Image (tube, coloured by chain):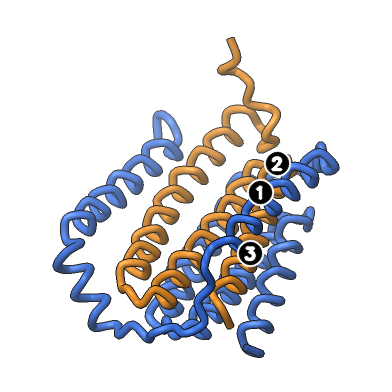
Chain colours: A blue, B orange
Amino acid sequence: MIPFAVASLVLLGSGVMAVRTRDLVHAVLWLGLALVATAGIYVTMDAGFMAAIQVLLYTGGIVTLMLFAVMLARPDAEAAPNGQLRAALAVAAVFAGVVSVVLRSPDATTGAHIETQVLGAVILNQLALPFEVLSALLLVAMIGAIVLARKKDA
Amino acid sequence: MTLHAVLIVAALMFCIGLFGVLTRRSLVSVVLSVELMANAANINLVAFSRFGNHPWGQAMALFAIALTVAEVVVGLALVILIARTHGSTDADVPSALKG
């Protein structure tokens, strides 16, 4: 329970900082901390493989990518956030709705450890077709990103 | 740790991300906030996988991570393109598609 509480606090704190920090580079670094804390939550839920993927792909890949984007786009200082009060009210309503649904659903206290071997077998047997479609999607996304971000007449 | 605790933490995370999407002005930080929301969804998937004792939840979370990566790649390419064509990454600037 205590590791989960610590990871959750780090996750929520760094999430708030990522959303509130004006300096984009710092915001992206706070996002990295939030993603690492998520990996910590996965570890407390006995999902070691997911934690490894989270750190490798999300933290290693996405944070690096976003830092590159921040430096390439060279954004000018961000304007003051708009409509904070209205947004806070809307978000609070969404949160209240989600929590009311969660609390009415049955709770579970005992969890089972899922072996990585079982996960691998599931992905490569029952979910083989989505897996292949996903690899095609990643290829398309890569080509699309290159086409979009390429300088014209280069 | 119970299922409800994890779900509520994930709901909080989702709401923080939603607040960022609604208030941030820079397109990069909007993409960043969407990341936080997608991350909250992944936490839910892994939690259901653990407490429901079924590997498909984790498999779905893995697929969702790959989908998010694809989304971020295209999204950031669009941000760079907009920064080049409009000279700004403010979310209010690209209104050229308005009728």
Q: Nearer the viewer, residue B94 or A152?
A: B94
- For badge 2, the amino acid type reads Leu
Q: Nearer the viewer, residue B88 or A102?
A: A102
Q: Residue at x 74, y 70 (%)?
A: A13
Visible residue check, residue A147: yes
Q: Residue at x 50, y 61 (%)?
A: A62
- For badge 1, the amino acid type reads Leu
Above or below: residue A118 compared with residue A153:
below
Dot 2, crowdedness within 10 Å: few (<14), some or many (≥20)?
A: some
Q: CA distance from mark 1 to mark 3?
A: 14 Å
Q: Which residue is mark 2?
A: B22
Above or below: residue A125 compared with residue B86:
below
Above or below: residue A139 compared with residue A127:
above
Q: Which circle, 3 or 2, is nearer the viewer? A: 2
Q: CA distance from mark 2 to mark 1?
A: 6 Å
Q: Which residue is mark 1?
A: B18
Q: Which residue is mark 3?
A: A31
- For badge 3, the amino acid type reads Leu
Which quarter of the image is occupied by the C terminus of chain B?
A: top right
Q: Which circle, 1 or 3, is nearer the viewer? A: 1
Same chain? Circles 2 and 1: yes
Label 1 lies in what chain?
B
Badge 2 vs badge 1, beta-carbon distance below 8 Å: yes
Q: Residue at x 22, y 68 (%)?
A: A123
* Res. A79 mark: none
